[in-house]
Image: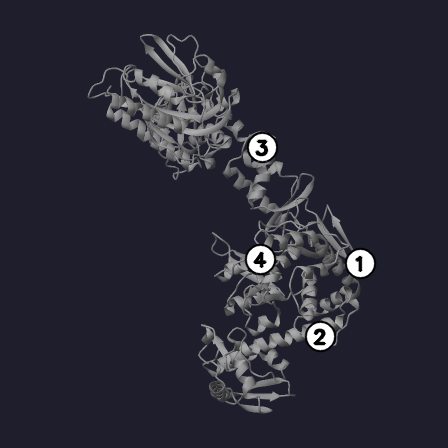
């Protein structure tokens, strides 16, 4: 070996060791069959180890090291040096813990010689096949190495050095050996011991003489993942479970085998044309037949099925796929020989299946359906009852635990799916129906608020009183975005919230606080809260604070989805869905938000079905924020409370952390004050009778009662709500091109009548005169469209004193428009479309038009 070659060897050894060893970890270097016997030394200085290995490289069949970490005390045997004819080497008891699962692929050949290129390549092919097999089962990429004659896979693990770990690794290797070893390459089952010595990468494998046909080769790491992920115990157990466990001695066999002395298995395989990938000896006296295609499921084509014949006449068969977990030799015979019915098979068929056990251990759960025909289970967890959807991951985890506690084993996915089907049946045909809600609901005249904490506590709200219940009736369902609410302080004060949200106008303060309490009332239409204002007005933070009081969430502000279906899902999964930083809303989304405000349903096709539908029940407290007033359609504006926030001066700004710290100090009192205000309002609500009720009648009547108990007075609330509705109505009219044009038409007249077609012509003339944009999609292009557009804003026009009537008159429809009083709103620009920004040096007003000016009706 030249000096250059020696330096290269040292560099490679140190580089490869750095991939497999932690800094300062002690390892034994062991060299067998030298002229001086076994050479051994213990090293935590890998430069010294490389120096020793270099002296022997190419002169001995192989150089080894301990793959797992050696106890530090053994360094005293020979610290960073080698001794000849070593009396002591590392034993299993000397290993600290197991860091690696080694898989060795050894070509079948005569002992003491190197492999041919064909044999060498076959080992690498099998290693790649097993790497793919394990990756499909969720394993990470391994260290892939060339042993010189075959291949190595090294998977990182973290197991204690104990008998249980040894048995687990042994069974895992036996499973791989069983499924993959063939007449050409074996998976070495003997490398399971903790003190296993391993080829030192960077050194030569020199078995026998170097020839052209059987050359000596360098052992080396070919690939190593940048961030190796440890294989879990569960993954190892899943692999180990693939190893058949049959007895092979005497005349006894396991429950899955059948003794059939004289049975000619090869003739059976040939007669029924079973697709054998390969056959090979297995363990001591057995012969295994690995099938290319599973006889029970032709989609299983990854050599998962097998047949084993033992020397005592026992035969076993099976498939490693979960869906074939119940298959065996008896079911295979039965598949091809319908009259086959041995007594042992009858006994086997009586055994309780995994699905049966899962159904049995689920008896303590109470199964029922909600009003949308979805299956739920009420189960006891840690001393309290939780309501979980049967199809959810959490219920499957609970059921798996029940099964494991009973059997100390894991159920197969096929058995789990079968059992879940039975449980859905129980919910549909044997269980009661419970109407489940998010966050708030009503039962027997009381309101309930879900705190969504780990104890599943809820607040029961009755007239004058609130109490926290630890064992509540089945009322609520939950989802991943829900977050626990603080334990309320019922002696608190809701008005503390105004210290954290900058609403300057007192009318808006009254509306905002009453709105927030109405959010705690189930089964009534809820107003849509809209925060508008220029940037820096704390719109997003204000909406987040509002949601933390009503419906705390992991993601408290949402982005408006693109599709209607995604919007419906967001509405269904959040009691207070709050959409942030909007520029506008399409007509379809605006309509869906109207449904969510007043209550309604949304239907979509159930996933993976042709005709089933999933119904989403929508009645939500929707929140919207935007620089402009994002609601422009009349029907949504009618349902909205629009609060404009002022920009916060720089000298009054606070860091977000300070804002939230201050809020959290008050949150329990704010939440408790809101719930207590509702309890107090419940006492006077039945007595309240209002002469006139607007569109949001329930909200108005409850708002009156809440304003009374908050000390503002019901009449003051009605006045504030009237002003807000008037402003909203102005927004609705000025943003609707037909309504705006009708107002302009009636500005100087009391009545107008004619056909709908003539009205369209007149409106086009007035729109051109008043500079109202008629090119928008919402401006009608035909008379029948005009009729629909007029009906959209009928209530808005009535609020400003304009009424109309459309009747059939012969060949056409006639429309009569009448103005009563003088309260017709003057035409004004849509907020955000036309903006007065100041005056120039000559005192002239500077008018700024937005880029999307033409998309709005108005000036």
Nearest to viewer (mark 2 / mark 1): 2
Reading the chain from its start, which is encountered first: label 2 or label 1?
1
Q: Nearer the viewer, residue 785 or 128?
A: 128
Cα distance, mark 2 to mark 1?
26 Å
Q: Does 604 appear above or below 790?
A: above
Position in image of residue 761 (x %, y %): 47, 88
Nearest-to-viewer mark from 4 and 2: 2
- Dot in front, 2 or 3: 2
Q: Residues within 10 Å of mark 2 (few under 14, many from 20)?
A: few
Q: Position of residue 81 (x, y in %)?
A: 39, 14
The answer to which image quadrant residue 198 occupies is top left
Which callout, 4 or 2, points at the residue further toward the start of the chain? 4
**Other-residue count near label 1 (Cα within 10 Å), few / some / many at <14 / 14–19 / ≥20:** some
Query: Badge 3 local density, few (<14 within 10 Å), some, or many (20+)?
Result: some
Q: Secondary structure at mark 3?
A: helix
Residue 464 image label:
1
Q: Is residue 806 above or below residue 62?
A: below
- The residue pinned by badge 2 equals 719
Residue topped by disc 3:
404
Q: Are marks 1 and 3 in contact (CB under 8 Å)?
A: no
Q: Which residue is mark 4?
A: 572
């Amino acid at each position: 070996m030249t000096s250059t070659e020696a330096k290269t060897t040292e560099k490679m050894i140190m580089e490869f060791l750095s991939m497999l060893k932690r800094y300062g970890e002690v390892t034994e270097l062991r060299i067998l069959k030298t002229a001086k016997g076994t050479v051994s030394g213990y090293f935590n200085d890998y430069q010294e180890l490389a120096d020793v290995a270099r002296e022997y490289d190419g002169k001995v069949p192989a150089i080894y090291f301990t793959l797992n970490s050696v106890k530090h005390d053994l360094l005293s045997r020979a610290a960073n040096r080698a001794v000849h004819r070593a009396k002591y080497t590392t034993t299993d008891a000397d290993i600290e813990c197991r860091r690696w699962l080694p898989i060795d692929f050894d070509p079948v050949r005569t002992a003491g010689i190197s492999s041919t290129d064909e044999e060498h390549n076959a080992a690498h092919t099998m290693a790649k096949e097993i790497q793919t097999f394990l990756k499909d089962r969720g394993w990470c990429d391994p260290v892939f190495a060339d042993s010189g004659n075959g291949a190595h896979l090294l998977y990182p693990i973290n197991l204690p050095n104990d008998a249980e770990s040894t048995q687990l690794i042994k069974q895992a290797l036996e499973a791989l050996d069983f499924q993959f070893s063939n007449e050409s390459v074996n998976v070495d089952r003997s490398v399971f011991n903790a003190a296993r010595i391993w080829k030192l990468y960077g050194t030569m494998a020199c078995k026998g003489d170097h020839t052209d046909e059987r050359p000596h080769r360098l052992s080396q790491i070919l690939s190593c993942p940048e961030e190796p992920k440890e294989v879990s115990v569960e993954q190892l157990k899943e692999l180990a479970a693939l190893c058949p466990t049959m007895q092979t001695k005497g005349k006894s066999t396991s429950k899955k085998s059948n003794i059939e002395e004289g049975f000619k298995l090869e003739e059976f395989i040939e007669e029924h044309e079973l697709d054998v990938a390969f056959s090979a000896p297995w363990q001591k006296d057995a012969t295994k037949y690995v099938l290319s295609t599973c006889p029970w499921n032709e989609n299983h084509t990854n050599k998962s099925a097998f047949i084993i014949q033992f020397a005592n006449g026992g035969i076993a068969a099976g498939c490693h796929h979960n869906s074939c977990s119940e298959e065996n030799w008896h079911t295979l015979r039965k598949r091809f020989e319908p009259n086959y019915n041995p007594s042992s098979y009858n006994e086997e068929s009586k055994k309780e299946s995994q699905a049966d056990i899962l159904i049995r251990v689920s008896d303590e759960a109470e199964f029922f359906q909600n009003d949308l025909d979805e299956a739920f289970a009420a189960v006891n967890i840690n001393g309290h009852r939780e309501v979980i959807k049967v199809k959810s991951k959490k219920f499957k985890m609970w059921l798996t635990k029940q099964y494991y506690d009973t059997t100390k084993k894991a159920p197969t996915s096929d058995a789990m799916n079968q059992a879940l089907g039975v449980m859905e049946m129980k919910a549909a045909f044997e269980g009661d129906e419970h109407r489940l809600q998010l966050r708030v609901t009503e039962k027997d005249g009381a309101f309930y608020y879900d705190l969504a904490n780990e104890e599943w506590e809820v607040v029961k709200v009755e007239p004058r009183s609130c109490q926290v219940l630890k064992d509540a009736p089945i009322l609520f369902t939950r989802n991943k975005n829900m977050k626990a609410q603080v334990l309320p302080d019922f002696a608190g004060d809701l008005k503390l919230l105004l210290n954290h949200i900058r609403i300057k106008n007192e009318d808006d303060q009254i509306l905002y606080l009453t709105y927030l309490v109405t959010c705690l009332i189930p089964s009534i239409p809820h107003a849509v809260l809209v925060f508008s204002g220029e940037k820096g007005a704390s719109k997003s933070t204000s909406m987040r604070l509002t949601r933390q009081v009503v419906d705390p969430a992991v993601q408290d502000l949402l982005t408006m989805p693109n599709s209607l279906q995604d919007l419906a899902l967001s509405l269904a999964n959040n009691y207070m869905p709050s959409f942030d930083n909007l520029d506008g809303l399409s007509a379809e989304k605006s309509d869906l938000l109207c449904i969510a405000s007043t209550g309604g349903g949304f239907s979509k096709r159930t996933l993976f079905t042709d005709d089933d539908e999933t119904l989403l029940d929508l009645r939500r407290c929707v929140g919207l924020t935007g620089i402009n007033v994002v609601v422009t359609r009349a029907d949504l504006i009618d349902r909205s409370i629009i609060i404009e926030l002022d920009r916060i001066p720089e000298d009054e700004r606070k860091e977000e952390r300070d804002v939230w710290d201050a809020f959290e100090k008050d949150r329990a009192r704010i939440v408790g004050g809101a719930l207590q205000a509702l309890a107090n309002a419940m006492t006077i609500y039945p007595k309240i009778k209002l002469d006139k009720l607007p569109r949001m009648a329930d909200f108005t009547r409850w708002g009156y009662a809440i304003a009374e108990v908050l000390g503002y007075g019901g009449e003051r609330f009605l006045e504030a709500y009237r002003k807000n509705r008037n402003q909203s109505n102005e927004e609705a009219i000025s943003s609707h091109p037909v309504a705006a044009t009708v107002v302009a038409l009636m500005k100087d007249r009391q009545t107008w009548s004619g056909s709908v077609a003539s009205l369209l012509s007149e409106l086009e003339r007035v729109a051109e005169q008043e500079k109202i944009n008629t090119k928008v999609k919402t401006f009608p292009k035909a008379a029948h469209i005009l009729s629909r557009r007029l009906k959209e804003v009928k209530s808005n026009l009535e609020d400003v004193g304009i009424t109309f009537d459309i009747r059939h008159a012969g060949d056409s429809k006639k429309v009569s428009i009448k103005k009563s009083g003088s309260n017709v709103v003057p035409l004004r620009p849509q907020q955000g479309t036309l903006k007065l920004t100041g005056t120039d040096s000559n005192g002239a007003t500077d008018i700024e038009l937005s880029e999307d000016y033409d998309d709005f009706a108005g000036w």
